Structure formats: structure tokens, C-alpha cells
Image: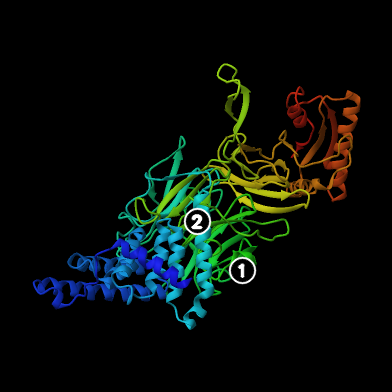
Amino acid sequence: MKKVLYILFTTLLATTCLNAQNIEFKSKNFKDNSEGLKQALESIKKGDGFLKQAEKAIEEKKENLAIFYYEQALTNYLDAQKFNPNNSELNFNLGKCYLNTWEKSKAAAHLEKAISLDEENIDADAYYLLAQSYKYLNEYDKAVESYKEYQLTLSKKQLQNTKRALKNEILDTQNAKKLFEKPVRVFVSNMEDINTPYSDYSASITADEEFMIFNSRRPDATGGKKDVDGKYFSDVYIMYKKDGKWQKPVNMGPPLNTDGHDEAVALSPDGQQMYLHKVDAGNNSNIYESKLVRDKWGDPIVMPTTINTTFNETQASFSHDGIKIYFISDQMGNPDIFFSGIMDRKRNQWGKGQRIGYDLYTPLDEGAIYYHPDGKTMYFSSKGHNSMGGYDIFKTVQGKDGIWSKPENMGYPINTPYDEKYFTITANGKYAYVTSNREGGEGEWDIYRMRFLGPEKPNMVDNEDQLLASIAQPIREIKPEPPVEVITMNLTILKGRILDDFTKKPVLADIEIYDNVKNQMVALFHSNELTGKFLVSLPSGVNYGIAVKAEGYLFHSENFDLPELSDYQLIEKDIYLKNIAIGSKVILKNIFFDSGQSKLRPESTSELTRLIELLNYAPNLCVEISGHTDNVGGEAYNIKLSEDRANAVVNYLVQKGISKARLTAKGYGPKKPIASNDNAEGRQQNRRTEFEIVKN
């Protein structure tokens, strides 16, 4: 069988260059052009030198430098090829170089020619490289045959060392074919307005897509200098969305950008924090953090040594609640996914980084990571798992038990045989931004926008069209089914501004997020001092209490009880904080009673604690606690129920040490509605507990 396979494969290659034969770069073959031969040999010598440097850079994991040397080798080899296009070794080296530069699709033709010119003496690696190159042409069956042919060229000892790896290569190629033949429903578009002939990569967006940051190695980089790879140093750029369209990107300048390489790797969902990647003087990669203060980004501060090690930490992502960081580190050998949790916010103390779930790491490299604001979904790039080739984007979901699901390849055309290394997706799950070096781009790395189309709409058969139908074979009218909804994330985004209720000016405030069932704070955010803007991500499945606090103001209360599988929603709401003054009222939206009952539910504890803190903070404050109902039922009953509920709150406060003399309980029943009682939403708003300052 092996012999038959060999004959078929070599016959196929022979037909591509039927009359060609290998021509050595020797004087006897070029008697009439000795000067041309001399120049060609000089070009080959230079190319060989660059090729050795490229292979050394690969060993040292200096990818960009390796590409530079491969490009230099390619330039020299192409000069030699103009003189003699029919040399097997030269075509082999051309194929190898193309395979390691940005023009990978050109490799196959040269490798095919190299084999056909001298199949008896060709380097065995030619078959392996040819298999790789076929994948970039989406010719997966040819790739499998080339892998098998490569296997035939190996000695018994070589085969023993590579058999498992080759088997995995073949399985991955067959899997790539399946993905290619069954594409996912997504519309891919190159972001031509921001991509340049240079590298543009690693886009990060806020949860509401208000602005995007990305990296670029374009000529207007800070300092305008080039690295040893001949490309400009990378800088961080920002662009805003206006009326649904992305505006022109702008270099973010100092202190984020310097004369060296500066790369942003993640943006927090609210756009107030950023992780960056920098290389120190010892050539060690570290993660830095910068925070937005008013309208200025602060100096990047290196993350602590529990995250940054003596190894390389290159990529990172924020968790939705800001209490974890997920990052890529090669401290265990190949780059893998790690995470760390905050231990002390004020001191910026983080726990020691730990490698994430067993099913997520492979013997191959993980590239970049994005943790979605839904609090359970992670996207990452990897050369392992069932990649189509190079880096692919994978998705995994964390279960209630904390275990991450088996990574799922996002499919073609999100992934290709090229590298898809950086990925971010909108909060609603409808759009994603992917960085890829796939063929047809504007530059080396390009940013692509992906629009998920959802399941295909099947057709359904409707009534017979009696006018057109024949008696023997009725024709039925084909109608599309109603639109199929795109699956969205289980997440609520709350955004708006924190403003002074009287002056309407922005307020710098703390936004505390509580799990009312567990009675514990699960996240802490801050509004922007200059604009008052805030954004919080609330994954479904939690009864959230939200407390907005600022010095000199009464706290503001919000409640979001989100069922486990509630759909994505974006809520925009400005919050007005009231001064601590007589007549100021606050609705206690996280005080809970069972229907028709006046016993406080345990979920009320966090809200009551905040009220106690306020009364202790202002010891001269006297307040009225008032209960209110809707108009369903008898008025006398509702007044009694509301009064009992107000007394329940007062009694709780007294038990916790607040003087009874400072508290008044009052039940108003349905007498003071704040919304219409004609609908369920209005009636729900009217059922409330308030406090009002009556003395200060």
C-alpha cells in the first residue's frame, strides 16, 4: 500500500513539471553567463545566511525577527531564481521562506517544483512543508497525502519519534476540512478604515462599544523609530464610535506610548482601566495596568510579582467584576492560561497566579485571552486542541461547579489555516473583532469585524397554489419561517452617569454591587470624576443590590433580580445623588418582604447595613421610615401592611444600636404613588420602602 501511495504521489507531482529537470548552479550549466552565475551564487549565499538567522530566531521564540530574516532570505533567493528557476534546493528554500512570511499561499508551488525536480535527493522535510502549505490553499486531502508521504521517507527510529505528532497533524487537517466544509453563519469584513499596510492588531472594546483601542506598527508611532525587524515600534491607538460608525483612529500618545514597543492587551468593560504589555531591559515580558483619571490615562504601573514572574507574561483580560485577572504566562514551559484574584485593592495585592482548568491547556502555545462580561465565557487563541492551523479562536464556558467546558473551535471563517490570534466580542454577542494574518488583508496583521447571523432560516411549505398546481403534482408555495433570533448573552449592562441631584454636575462615586442572597459585595466600580459616566456588567442568575455612594451624599439604591437565563439587555440610566439635607428621600430598593407579609427577608440585610452606616456617619440625623403599597386590595388593609413593614425596618435598626428617638415609622398605603397603578410595572414601583430626612 505504501508503495502504491508513493507512486501515485510522485506521479502527480511529475505531471506539474513534465519536462523540467534539476539544474545545479555550476559553471558547466551556464558557460555563456558566468557573471550571472556569480551574482546568483552570491544571492544564494546571502539568502542562506539570513535563513540560518531566521531559524535561530525561531528557536529563541523571536517571531517578528524571524519573519524579518525569512523576508531577507526570500529577497535574495528570488534574485537567484530569476537566473535559474529550475533548481530543486532553491525552490525548497523559497517554499520554506514563503511558509514563514506573510505570503504563505505561494509556498506550495515552489515545494511541488522542488520535489518534482529532484525527488530522489529532496530533503524529506519538503513533504512535511508541502502538507503545511496545502492547508493555506484549503487543499486538505492533498495535505493529508503529503503528511503520509513524509511518513514514508522517515527511518524506523525517526518514525518512532514523530509518529504521534504526525498522527495529530493528520487528524487536525481532517478536522480543518470538516470545519471548512461546514462554515458557521458569520459575515466577515476587513476594517479597511483602520487597517494599514502595516500590522494592526489586538482590538479591545468597551462593553457598550463606545470606543476601541488597538495596536499598530504604522509610521506615526511615537519616536518614529524602527525595531531590528525593520518595522516601526508598536503604539496604542484609540477610536470612538459616533452614530454607529467608527471614527478615525488617534495615537494615544504619552504616557501609554513611548519610543519603544507599547501594546494594549485588554480594556475593562467600563473603559476605565487598561492592561498593557511591555518588555523590560532584561528582555522579559510583563503586564502593566493604567487607569483613566478624569480624561487622562495614568502612567502604566507594573503588576505585582505574584502575576509577573521571571518568565514572560504577555496577554491579559479583566474579569467582569474586576476581582480577577486572566493572563498568559510561559512559566510552565509553553504559554498557558493563568489567573489570579485580588487580595487587597488599596495595596494592589494579588494572589499567586495559578494555571487554569486542565482541559484548557495543551503542549502547544496559547496566544491571547478574552473573558466576556457575562462572567462565565472565555475566548482564547491556541495552536493546540483542534486548530485549523496556527492560532485558532476557541470558546469555553465555566459551569456552576467552576469547571471549564471542553474548548470549542469557533469554526470557519472565524478561523482559517492562518493565525487568528486576538479576539474580542461585544456584550450582546452579536459582533466580534478578530486579528488575523489571513490572505487578502490590508497589511501583515489586520483587524476583522465578524457579524454573527444566527441559525439559518428553514423554509416551510404553506398552502397549495391552486392556480398553478397540476392535478397530478400540486405545487406548494414556499414561505420563509419567521426570523430566527440570534442567541444572545445572559447579561445586563447598566450604564449612565452619576450626577448631583441639585446642580446636575458629575459626581465621583463608588458603585457597590451586592449579591442580595449571599449578602456580600461582589464587585466595586467607580464613576468617572469628569463625566460621571459608569458602566457595570451584571451576569444573569443573581439578585443584585446596587449602592451608589459619594462623600456628602445619601446613598442611592437599585435592584436587579436577574433570572438564570435572562437575555441580554442594555439599560441606560442617570443616577442623581441627593445631599444630606432635610426633605431628601431615598427609595430603599433592596428591602424585601414576602407578598402580604411584614417580616423582613434575609436579602434585605445589605441594604439595612448601608442605612445603619449612614445613621452612624451622621449621628444627628433623624429619619422617617415609610411603607407604601399599590392600590390592589382595601385601603385600610394596605395602610396597616405598609405601617407594619415600616415598623419592621425601625425595629431592625433599633436592634442594631440606632436610637429609637431618631426613627419614625409611617405607613401610607396607596396614598403616595410614584407611578401609575394601571399596569404591573407601575404597581411594582409603588410597592416600596423609603426613608426621608426629617432632622439634621
**Residue 279 seen from this side:** no
Which residue is at a point 36% across and 74% down the rendered structure image? 55
Q: Whole-percent x and y of residue 529?
A: 54, 46
Observer-nearest residue: 189 or 320? 189
Task: Please name the residue shown 37% across and 53% down the image.
Answer: 439
> Which of the pair 428/625 is nearer the observer?
428
Give the amino acid type for the residue marked by disc 2 in the picture.
Answer: Lys
Across and down, in percent, residue 432 comes to 51, 47
Instruction: Provide the residue designation for mark 1.
Output: 355
**Residue at the front extreme?**
472
Q: Earlier in the sequence, mark 2 or mark 1?
A: 2
At x 76% / y 42%, what residue is drawn?
590
Q: What is the number of the mark on residue 296?
A: none
Query: In the figure, is residue 547 to the left or right of 690?
Result: left
Q: Which circle marks residue 177 in the picture?
A: 2
Residue situated furthest left in the rendering = 32
Which of the two discs, 2 and 1, sits closer to the camera? 2
Residue 192, picture quadrant:
top left
Residue at mark 2 to residue at mark 1: CA–CA distance: 32 Å
Q: Residue furthest bottom?
A: 157
Q: Position of residue 316 (x, y in %)?
A: 53, 61
